[in-house]
Amino acid sequence: MEERLRLAFLEPGAAEGPWNMALDEALLNEAAAGRARPSLRFYSWRPPAITFGYSQDAAAEIDLDACRAAGVPALRRITGGGAVFHQAELTYCVVVPASAFPGPISASYEIICGALAAGLDFFRNGFKFSPVNDIIFGDKKVSGSAQVRRGGMIMQHGTALLDTDLNKMFGLLRVPEEKYKKHGLSEARRRVCSLKEILCYAPTFEETAEAVKLGFQTVFDLGDPEPPSNETLVAAAALVPKYSSDDWNLRRSRKPDCGDEE
């Protein structure tokens, strides 16, 4: 991109899983319809939740009985990718025109994830983009992202782990062996790393949001924080029942909707 794309920078906040996913989708839909500007927002999860990719079989990726016992909801995303345990983290969601990122999908991942890595570098140098959609420190994964394209817009969201309970995470997730054995690891938890492990302390959500905003400003032009429009909030509220329903979340697998591209 020759010039920095102007984005609405939405006020950070914490919410339940269905609202987080509903607002992400509403921001995409409203931008695709021309009713909302491209945007960036940061958020966290209260209480913790699991999300998994659009085409995944929930029962194959997640121990659903363990999730119910722990009171951790499992939500299907509209993006691709794998299952993610959201606990102590910063999650970002960026909605941008696909025309701003000509070239392969991998190039847009590199630019957007690179902005996140640049922000994390304010804590300590060494965070790097790892294709297709990860950020690593050394050989460990700190962040993963996923994308969907709809109506000429890209919506990409992803995580930055501040701290996490690995025992709880991997007690709820069912990680296929090939995902960690291809990295020469004997168990999945050896692949994952939080900022607390790297920095020897867990930065707060607010500290991380400030740093990551600086990283995104290397790519995008961001204004002062503002709330989502009333129209977007109404659209998000209408989507909350979808993300609260077993019909959406637990159906065995789904194919992308017409016009969507994971």
Image (spheres, grey):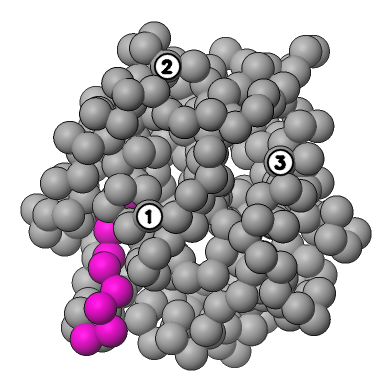
Q: Residue at x 84, y 54 (%)?
A: 121
257 left or right, relative to 248: right
Q: Which of the 4 image quadrants contains residue 1?
A: top right
Identify residue for label 3: 213
Decide: few, some or many residues near mark 1? Use Cα within 10 Å; few <14, some 14-19, many ≥20.
some
| Secondary-structure class at tag 1 | strand
Q: Residue at x 30, y 41 (%)?
A: 22
Q: Which residue is mark 2?
A: 36
Type of amino acid under label 2: Ala
| Gap in angstroms between the C-alphas marked 3 and 2 | 20 Å
Say what amino acid the circle numbered 1 marks.
Ala
Q: Label 3 sits on what residue type?
A: Lys
The span shown in magenta is: 69-77
In the image, farthest residue toward the right:
125
**SS for callout 2:** loop
Would residue 177 be visible to someone looking at this image?
yes
Q: Is residue 168 magenta?
A: no
Count residues near mark 3 (Cα–Cα under 10 Å), then give few for <14, some for 14-19, many for 20+: many
Q: Which residue is mark 1?
A: 15
Point out residue 177 in the picture as x, y percentages from the top left corner: 47, 79
Measure the alpha-carbon separation of dots 1 and 3: 20 Å
Q: Residue furthest top?
A: 34
